[in-house]
Amino acid sequence: MHFISSFMAYSRCKAALRTTTMAALSVCAMTAAHAVPYAIYYTGQAVAESGTGDTMPGATGGEYQITLVFDNGNASTEEQEWQAGDLQCVIWKMRRQGSTVFEQNMRVEPATHHSGSIKTGSNGALTEVFTTLSQQATPLPANAYTLVSPPVPSVPDLDTSLTPYWFIPNVPGTNGLLGYSGVFYLYSTGFDDASGQVSTGTNLTGWSTTPTRFRSTSCAGQPLLAVAPQYTAAKPVPTLGEWALIGLSSLLALMGLRRVRCRRV
């Protein structure tokens, strides 16, 4: 009887160990890093358009911000590269306290001109941005963007039905835009950057130092992945979060206790 009791206890311990091991593996599987969109931000000072266009009312004398949202299928920012095809969204915030917001879904309508890429180093810090990135399509498809511009006190309202154009850095464009020298326009009304242009390439002045997770799930009124992404070759980097490590440690400790009990049987 003692032998049978010991054998049954051993069997129970073995089954418990198997269950605990599977639970630990499940923790690893569920908490393995998933690809998420990342974003970088550029903050500049808006000044009057200096080319052949008109200056956008209420845009000058204040800050404006550009947000680039991208996803290459990886879940890490370390030693990564994002090409123009990885862009999901471009957001411009301008005029008083960023009240005017333009969003372009890059899966619906990619940039018309681009060169370079976004790159990070081994510590995840930004090392390079696009050398050229612009929207010069005429007209820009209505389902590719949204433009929200609430009234600004004592400033003429913007005509949001006009075709938007934007330029990084501020290279003169095509399609009749050769005389322009600014960074953002509604048809012929726009503004320039106080430094002369948006920083590009390895000149990271004004850009955020590290890509951060983009928390919104939509762009221009559509899901970020409404159009299937064309990912570049991805290098998987499995990671565990803080709570996952705590949970895994607890499960390993429980496995150790189970094994000790089994040995005492």
Image (cartoon, rainbow, N blue to C red):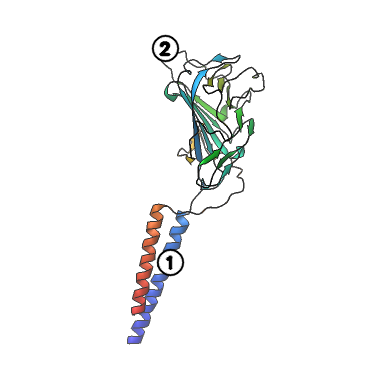
Q: Pick the residue in front: 131 or 110.
A: 131
Q: Pick the residue in front: 124 or 109.
A: 124
Identity of the residue drawn at 40% across and 66% down: 20
**Does residue 259 appear in this view?**
yes
**Does residue 223 appear to the left or right of 171 in the view shown?**
left
**Does residue 213 appear in this view?**
no
The quadrant of the picture occupied by the N terminus is bottom left
Mark 2 lies on residue: 154
Identity of the residue drawn at 40% across and 57% down: 245
Sequence-first disc among 2 and 1? 1
Q: Is residue 242 above or below residue 63?
A: below
Mark 1 lies on residue: 21
Q: Tell me which amino acid carries mark 1.
A: Thr
**Disc 1 element:** helix
Q: Tell me which amino acid carries mark 2.
A: Ser
Locate residue 123, reporting x and y percent.
Answer: 50, 46
Between the C-alphas of marks 2 and 1, the distance is 68 Å
Q: Is residue 138 above or below residue 238?
A: above
Locate residue 11, reporting x and y percent.
Answer: 39, 77
**Does residue 163 appear to the left or right of 12 in the view shown?**
right
**Disc 2 element:** loop
